[in-house]
Image (cartoon, rainbow, N blue to C red):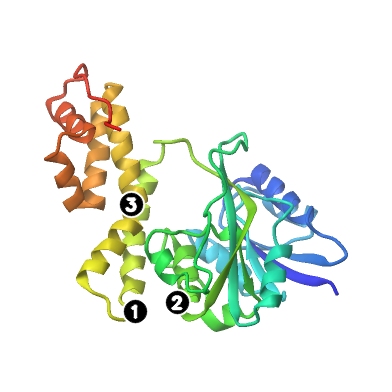
Amino acid sequence: MTRRVSVIIATYGRPLLLREALASIRALEGPDLTFEILVGDNGTMPETPEIVAEFGGIYTKTTKKGCAPARNLAMQRASGEFIAFLDDDDLWLPEHIRPHIAFLDAHPDYEAVFGQIVSTNALRQPLSGPWPENLPDDGDVFSTMLGGYFPQVGGSVFRGNAVAKYGLMDETLIGDSDWDWQLRVARNGRVGFISTPCVLFLQREPGSFDDLQFKRLRYTRRIFFRHARTLRGLTFRRLYALHTAALWQFYEYFSTHAISRSQAGQQAGALRAILGAFRTLPIFTVKQLFSATPFRSAFVASVLRRPGLKLPTPQQ
């Protein structure tokens, strides 16, 4: 029996990368597996429709900003037995999809299954091992997600009725609308996990996307509280712990680059990163400023505008 998977792709002005992404999808097809490729475009590149047609995809266009409107256009047309996603700058690996379908066949009470992601640089060279290493095996991944696990949507497969059951993505969320949608699924149903690398996930150059992090931070916090309030028996202590874990990636980004920029004499950039850390986790940031840490040294150097100030190396 041939299984049919609807693949949702949002694209914005990256036709060459889109072609590679589409090729990685078609490469997985065989007698047992076929793909309905649905591309939502909110860019302006004239060659995009031609590239989609080259790979037998269905092209739709919107003028609305953000990934959610583009994905929603495609999601509304999905007719496959399963739904999968891929960002236009990422690539599927050959081991994707079939293990997900096998898992869902073996677990009819599960709504979706997540796989592993391999983060890469622009040359598609791995930056680390596959992540996550594991997830709860009882199907309850909701708390894990609230605690800072952001499943890269390209490694996830959902049943074909997911849109009918859980609706479309929230178009008011310019950032993390996919995390919000996956949280909705995980909150109401069981989600499995397979320890199989599925996607090459293109990472931006470290320290190069402050503005994006500031924007995402606002939406991530909003999404967190939207879903955290549904937890039963939620205490303030647990809420604080989950909130800290959910935003830790932002704090780590800003604090790490505050130190590295200060050490490089980029004091204005360091101060901006320190402000980013404070906006992310203010209480934790203040504690760091009152401790003998490289972070405090970066703050002192930035405030005093002393590029030559020697900073201590982190203690092991």
The numbered disc on residue 268 is: none
- Classify mark 2: helix, strand or loop: helix
Residue at (15%, 46%) from the top-left corner? 287
The picture quadrant where one finds residue 221 is bottom left
> Residue under circle 1?
230
In percent of width and height, residue 248 lies at 33, 52
Q: Secondary structure at mark 1?
A: loop
Of all residues, the one furthest to the front in this rendering is 316
Q: Quadrant of the N terminus?
A: bottom right
Question: How far separated are the C-alphas under marks 2 and 1?
Answer: 9 Å
Please indicate, yes or no, whether residue 250 appears anywhere in the rendered image: yes
Q: In the image, what residue type sits under mark 1? A: Thr
Position of residue 115 in the picture relative to residue 254 (left or right): right
- Say which residue label 3 marks: 248
Contact between marks 2 and 1 (CB within 8 A): the answer is yes
Lateral position of residue 233 relative to residue 167, left or right = left
Q: Residues within 10 Å of mark 2 (few under 14, many from 20)?
A: some
What residue is at 51 percent from the left and 60 percent from the top? 151
The correct choice, above or below, for 21 with respect to 157 in the image is above
- Residue type highlighted by circle 2: Arg
* Image spot of residue 49 (x, y percent): 70, 55
Q: Quadrant of residue 234?
A: bottom left
- Where does the C terminus fall, quadrant-wise? top left
Q: Is residue 59 above or below residue 288?
A: below
Tell me whether circle 1 and circle 3 mark residues in contact (CB < 8 Å).
Answer: no
Q: Is residue 59 left or right of 2 when viewed as pictured?
A: left
* Mark 1–mark 3 distance (CA, rounded to whole Å): 21 Å
Q: Does label 2 or label 1 sit earlier along the sequence?
A: 2
Judged from this view, the residue extending furthest toward the top is 308
Q: Which residue is mark 2?
A: 187
- Residue toward you, 302 or 58: 302
